[in-house]
Image (tube, grey):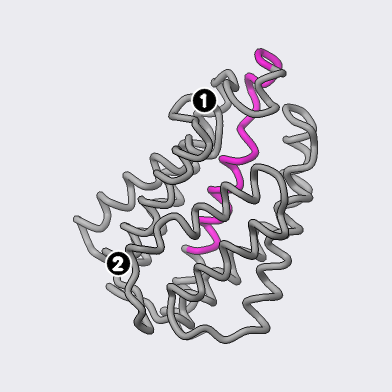
Amino acid sequence: MDKITTDGLRMALLCAARQIIKSEPYLTEIDTIIGDGDHGSGMKTGFSALEELLMGQQFQSPYELLHASGLCLVRTMGGASGVLFGTLFIGGLDQLQHTDWVTAQELVSFLEKGVKAIQTRGRAGPGDKTMLDALLPAAKAMTDELERSGDISGILREAHLAALEGVEKTKAMLPRTGRSKNFREKAIGYPDPGAISVSILLQGLSEGVEQFSRGE
């Protein structure tokens, strides 16, 4: 599948939102150990609002859908996570056309630019034990799979797998930004909650696209 319609993307986002909501207890557990304990509840609040938006509103284009989704997360999630996850959805909108579908190339460009926008806004980089340690390898995996197959399902599947590897690597990292930096050595051995959330988001998007392609 080299492109996906607005409704297909809406279904994928719904699947991702529900995965995040379901994962709240685990996100809270990890963030309680190496953070202030509110990451899980914030993610659940934001993505519950997103689920409600996706269920109750019609969208004319992927651009309109993703723009509304990003604004929803910024407005409802609160804190740094709301801004950063919202930026992921909004930062690459100029890569999309105002049509009823998005191509594999456009989707990859959109996500790549969103990741760069997060880097700029969050002033973090690889190895800082943040969501970027999942997003950056995911972005590279997307580009590689785009060149290899051009298939959106494969692109998101490979992005999810790369994000999971990134999450695993955060266990050995010292946090260098955000509130978790106060925990320093105590954070070693635990994955970064933001990186976990990225992997869950990509898993949901991947599974949602697969379901849509099967007509479920």
Q: Looking at the picture, how far across and down is residue 141, in whole percent? A: 33, 47
Does residue 192 show up magenta in the picture?
Answer: yes
Residue 148: x and y in percent read 20, 56
Q: Residues within 10 Å of mark 1 (few under 14, many from 20)?
A: some
Q: Earlier in the sequence, mark 1 or mark 2?
A: 2
Q: Main secondary structure of the magenta part?
A: helix
Q: Amino acid at mark 1?
A: Asp
Residue in the picture at 73% in, 65% down: 48
Which residue occupies 72% across, 44% down? 27
Q: Is residue 14 left or right of residue 22?
A: left
State the residue position of label 1: 128
The relative height of residue 98 versus residue 17 in the rendered view (above or below) is: below
Compared with 171, 204 (above or below) is: below
Residue at point 57% right, 51% down?
85
From the viewer's perspective, is residue 7 above or below residue 43?
A: below
Q: Which residue is painted at 68% across and 62% down in the image?
A: 47
Quarter of the figure with the N terminus: bottom left
Which circle marks residue 104 in the picture? Answer: 2
Residue reaching furthest to the top? 185
Relative image position of residue 189 (x, y in whole percent): 63, 22
Q: Which one is nearer the viewer's eye here, 215 or 37?
A: 37
Q: Position of residue 75 (x, y in %)?
A: 69, 59
Residue 207 bears which disc, if any?
Answer: none
Horizontal side of residue 52 vs 196, given as left or right: right
Frontmost residue, 128 versus 118: 118
Q: Nearer the viewer, residue 58 or 1?
A: 58
